[in-house]
Amino acid sequence: MRTGIFITGTDTGVGKTIVAAGLVLALKQRGLNVGYMKPVESGCPVLDGEVVPQDVRFVREVTGLRDDIDLMCPYRLKAPAAPSIASRLEDMHIDVAYIVDQYFQLSLMHEIVVVEGVGGLMVPLNNNDLVTDLVLQMGLDMLVVSRPGLGTINHTLLTVNMAKMMGIPLSGVIINGFGREAIGLPERTNPDEIEHFGNIPVLGILPWLKDLDFNTCKPGSLLSEFMERVNIDPLLQNDDDSFL
Ligand SMILES: Nc1ncnc2c1ncn2[C@@H]1O[C@H](COP(=O)(O)OP(=O)(O)OP(=O)(O)O)[C@@H](O)[C@H]1O
Ligand SMILES: [Mg+2]
């Protein structure tokens, strides 16, 4: 069985955290001991003197995970900017080897760790490394979260093809937020185009959940919708089955 999966998106705000939380809940439902990691989070508010990563807060609240915050999110940055920029402003250096080390420690405590990326694949972490370097050094397969509507074929294929060029194995695509906008021709036809041109399976289409509230950490129907609409089996299979 796979021991970790790296979730990236075609952009920031596409739903990586919601998909990561859904995946953690669905894997827990299967009886697995699951962990979650967000190696770098920028744009964190300071609450009572603490820099609080909001993605980690949401996932902790809805899944009940209680690992040390330094393992779950080693780099917590205040500025709402790319990690390379935010860390420079805060006189911090993001060290990919340190993230990998924290990840291995977390892996010892769980059967599988769901790792949420930062923005998209080509986001700089420091002067030398992009998110692609992080995924490669973590040695993980990647899941891509995409938007449903017009423009997503281009963004998804750019992400998928960059991963293939870099030698990052891919597990599939999840389309998130279906129904937030009116469902038209692109929403209905995009998944087939992505599968055909990306040579990659769309593992599921997660609807826009009106009963989910990120700010108050209410998952609403996330678990039931995730279990009904996403095929998680390929995410558990061995790395040999990946679509490199
Ligand atoms: N399926 C969904 N149903 C309801 N709300 C959603 C859904 N997906 C995303 N959202 C909302 O959109 C917001 C952005 O999604 P999310 O935080 O998961 O994006 P992200 O890709 O993790 O962004 P970042 O790059 O900042 O980590 C969420 O805070 C949530 O409020
Ligand atoms: Mg997120």
Image: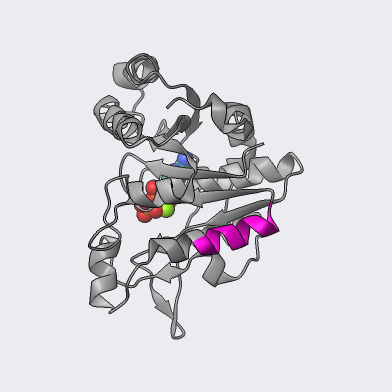
Horizontal placement of 164 versus 99: left or right?
left
Residue 168 percent across, percent down from the top left: 40, 37
Q: Could you say which is closer to the camera, residue 168 or residue 17?
A: 168
Q: Nearer the viewer, residue 118 or 17?
A: 118
In the rendered view, tell whether residue 242 sits above or below residue 10: above
Residue visible at 61% across and 47% down?
A: 24
Report x, y in % for residue 10. Answer: 32, 39
Outermost right residue = 31
Per the picture, the main secondary structure of the magenta-coloured stretch is helix
* Residue at point 49%, 33% (across, down): 206
108 in the magenta segment: yes
Image quadrant where residue 166 sits: top left
Residue 57 visible somewhere in the drawing: no
Q: Which residues are magenta?
A: 101-110
The C terminus, quarter of image: top left
Q: Could you tell me which quadrant the N terminus lies in?
A: top right
Residue 34 showing in the rendered view: yes
Q: Residue at x 50, y 53 (%)?
A: 213
Going by the image, does 81 lie left or right of 230? left
Q: Nearer the viewer, residue 213 or 234?
A: 234
Q: How is the image coloured?
A: one colour
In x, y percent, where is residue 91? 28, 79
- Relative to 82, say whether 25 is above or below: above
Question: What is the quadrant of residue 108 in the picture?
Answer: bottom right
